Every structure is written in C-alpha cells, then in structure tokens.
Image: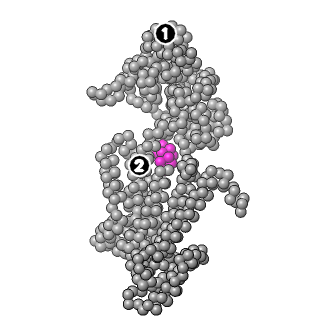
Amino acid sequence: MTAAVSAPVDHPWGRFALRRFGRLLVSVWVLVTAAFGMIHLIPGDPVRGALGPTASQELVEARRAALGLDQPLWQQYLDYLRGLFTGDLGVSMNSGMPVADILGDRLPATVELAVLAFALAVLVSVPLGLAFAVLTRGGRRRPLELGFTSTSVVLAAIPEFLLAVALVWIFSVNLGWVPVAGRDGPSSYVLPVVALALAPAAILARIVRVETLTVLRADYIRTARAKRLPSRTVYFRHALPNALTAAITLGGLLLGALVAGTVLVENVFAWPGLGSTIVSSILAKDYPVVQGVVLVYGVGVLVVNLVVDVALALLDPRSTIREG
Amino acid sequence: MRELRFDGVSVRFGSRGHRVTAVDGVDLTVPAGSVVGLVGESGSGKSTLARAAVGLVPLSAGRVTLDGAPVPTRGRRPLQMVFQDPYSSLNPRMTIGATIAEAVPRGTDRRAEVARLLALVDLPDRMTRYPAELSGGQRQRVAIARALAGRPEVLIADEITSALDVSIQGAVLNLIRDLQRTLDLTILFISHDLAVVRYVSDTIAVMYRGRIVEHGPADTVLADPQDPYTRELLASTEGRSR
C-alpha cells in the first residue's frame, strides 16, 4: 500500500493528483451535508407536506419514525452517512422503492445523453473551430468571420429547453422525421442529443478558433512554414495540439453545464433519466429521491472537474504549479 | 557554396498616405563561403532585409539572387534562416528530435541525420527532450540544427544571440564560426551589437534608416569608419565596453 502511494508522490503530477483527489473528498463531504440539510431547511414538516393535509397525525408520526426524523439531528446525520457508505440512500416516500434502485434505474439514460451530446459537441466544434481559424487568420475573409462569430453567439445564447421545443416543432411535428419524445430506438436520441450539444459546440468552436488564431501567430508556426511543411502538417501537427489546452479546460466546464442541461432537456423529451426524476420528485415532495439525485448530479460534476484538472496537469505541467 | 546578392532591394509597408520604407534600395553581396555582418540600430531595416531574402515579406523593388538565379520558392531551400527568439521559435509540444526531423529532406535516414546534426551543434543525446527542458543557449543550438537540416548553402542569422545571456552568447558565436568553417557556409549575420558582429564577420555592412551606409572589410570599417553614423555606433560600443 505504502509503495503504491509513494511511487506517484515522487512525481509532481502524482502529488498534484493526490492533492486534487483530497479536495474532491472535501467537496463531496460538503455536498453530502448540504443534501442532508436540505430536508431540514425546507419550511414546514416534509412528511406532512408529502402525505398531504388530510393524512392522520398517527400516519405522519409513523412515517416520521420510519424515516428516522424523530431522532436527534446528529444521530440522523450519522445514520445518513452510514447509509451512504453501505449504499442505502433511504426509500422513496411515494413508491416505497429504495432510492438507490431508482437512481440505478435512471442514471444510465442520463449518462448516455450527456456522453453522446458531449462527444457530438467535441467532434463538431474542434474541426469547425480549426477550419474557421485557418480561413479567417490574419484578418482574412472578414464577412465569414462576422458570420461565424454572430451565428455561434446566437446558438450559444439560446436556452436548451427553448431549442429543444423548436427542434421538436420542426423535425417531429412538421417533418415527422424523428419521434416527439421518449427513449425508443436510435432515432429518439437525435433531438435530445442535438438540443444538448448545440450550445456547448458553439462555445467550444469559438474558443478553438481564437486559440488557434493565437497559435498561428506564434514563432514556431513561422519555423514550421520555413521548413516548407505541407499546410495540413502545420495545422494538425503544430497548431492543433497547442490550441487544445484551453479547449480542454473549457470542455470540462461545459460538460458540467451539460449535465445540468439534461434536467431541462429530459423534461421536454420525457426522457426516463435523472433529470425527469428530480423534477417529478420535487413536485411530489419526495425528498429522499431528490436528495439522491442531487448527490448523483453533484458527484458527477465534481468527478468531471477532477478528471479535467488531472488530464490538464498531464498535458500542461504548469497548471499543477498554479494550484499552489 | 553560393553567393547571396541583393540588387536594389526595397521593401515598403503600408498603403498610400501612410507608407514606411523599411529597406531602401539596398545593394549587398555576401560572397560564397564568407560571413558578412550586418549592423544597425533597431528599426534600421536589418531584419526586414533578411525576411525579404527568405520570402517572408514581399519585395517592392529589386531582386535577391543566389549565384545569379532567383531564390527558389519550391522544393529544397538553399537559403535558411535562424530566428532571434529561441524560446518561441520551437514548438513546445514536439521533441527537439521531431522538430529537427521535419526539416530533414525526404529520402534520408532521418534518425541518423538528426543525431548527426545534434552532434554538430554539441547537443548529443537530447533527441527525446522537449524545448522546455533546455536552456536558451541549447534551444538556439537546436534552432541552428533545424536550419542546417535543410542542407542550406546560405544561412541568415537574425539576432541569434540577442535573447541570450552574455556568457552563452560566446558559445553560440563560437559554434557559428566552427560550423561556417567545417561546412563552408555563406552567412549573413545580423546583429545590433557591433562587438558580436566583429567576432564572426569577414566584412561588415552598416545599415541606417533602410540604407547601407558603409560596407567593407571588418578591420577597415572598425579602424577607420567613413560614415558619421558608423563612428557614432562604434563610439557607443566602446563606451559600453569600458
């Protein structure tokens, strides 16, 4: 064990990764505590709220006891933490199903959506940003540049749910190419994935273009041209790797935002994922489920950020220093 | 071994109404196998003249020839340039071996050629290093090896020591002198520093406001300067070294 830990510590990157992982644990603890506190900060009695004003006092008391809400606060907190470590996230107030089962049921659909949308955004934006950088370098083709920047800023500014509704109206209602909603076969993925991917793709393409423009002005690009390398070697081998560092940082942040975007998009498309679950359980005041979904979303975003930071430290050792 | 010749070369920037003449009718010959030092203050047009020779800026008038023929724009480049800043002229994401290998002409054993070039600039066994792992002087040697990879007959060195510490300048200058002798290169050596130019050059040309104001054997120009600007330049250098 000691040997396994001390080996990466010798390397600055290993030290950074360990320290960064420690920070993740602290963040997760804060998240867990906030999720726990949520149920107690909500005005009124959550059990009474869930069961409705007509429920008998005995029933409310019995449910409170079942949920452990009659225990002292610290006892509840410890029970909650113990539950997390054993995979017990409580039971749904409405269906009586364990929250862990509900999450396990819904998580894959959301992950699929987020991963596909992110992959689409990257696959579209990197070549697009590079191409527009090459076409508009050194003040060339001003009208094209104006067209690109204005189109991308508009696409990035449209909220996902509005875009989703517009896509449904055009491609499902009027053209009938793809299903309106639901998760049934490959064609049902098209609209939710596009609705989620469009804004991040537009932002990422802008960043890739600007970064590539900066790199194309660098002296080592002049050196590469002095070697009379073919243009594609100059762009793909010399410019692109240097332009992608900033794009990776931003890509990580966008992936986090994209996870949040699934909440809205899933509800428009009645997608059976965590996003539609959290909204329906909030409306039903099913707090254990809400807590569970909040935890999953939170941990998801934290882990994505960790992965991006650690990957970036590998690519660009300077970022480990900035951590201080 | 080739002769580099500038005939009535002018370079103008900007458009009507706001026009700057950076190089103004320069005639200069760099004889085959010799080193011509080009000195002048910042903005005198030295670097623009060099960039015009390799085609990085277009000529407004005149021509640049190698042994009487125009500098070829395709295929192998008999004319190579080493740039001023060794920190920014190497791709930070490529090993120096890969950077040099790219400049080696096709059809040669690239690995062996890179090793030979690195040995030539006194940097053996550094093939797998990244530029960030090297010092400024070492990077400038890599830049020189990169330029030599194209098997040029004429080398243009544009302020190659001005970004380096004084102690490292000497080593790079010695390297340039040795390379010039062993490879029999024709070199146009550009610097604002008269002491540096004096050390490597056979003849010295002084540039001032886009024109060559004085040109002659190094000893003559330094011992008996004719142009008032050269005298001023010389006086400032001596004042500094004292």
Seen at 39% across and 55% down, the residue is A203
Left or right of A102? Residue A160 is: left
What x and y, as percent, mark residue B130? 59, 42
Residues marked 2 and 1 touching at CB (< 8 Å): no
What x and y, as percent, mark residue A294? 47, 71
For the residue pair A221 and B231, the one nearer the viewer reads as B231
Seen at 48% across and 58% down, the residue is A252
**Count of labels in the image:** 2
Left or right of B20? Residue A246 is: right
Q: Secondary structure at mark 2?
A: helix
What residue does disc 1 label? B225
Q: Quadrant of residue B9?
A: top left
Is A2 included in the stretch rendered in magenta?
no
What x and y, as percent, mark residue B210? 40, 20
Q: Which mark is residue B216?
A: none
For the residue pair B118 and A93, the one nearer the viewer reads as A93
Residue mark closest to the camera, 2 vs 1? 1
- The answer to whether B190 is drawn above or below residue A259 in the figure is above
| Residue B160 visible, this angle | no
* Real-space CA distance between mark 2 and mark 1, rounded to the nearest whole angstrom: 53 Å
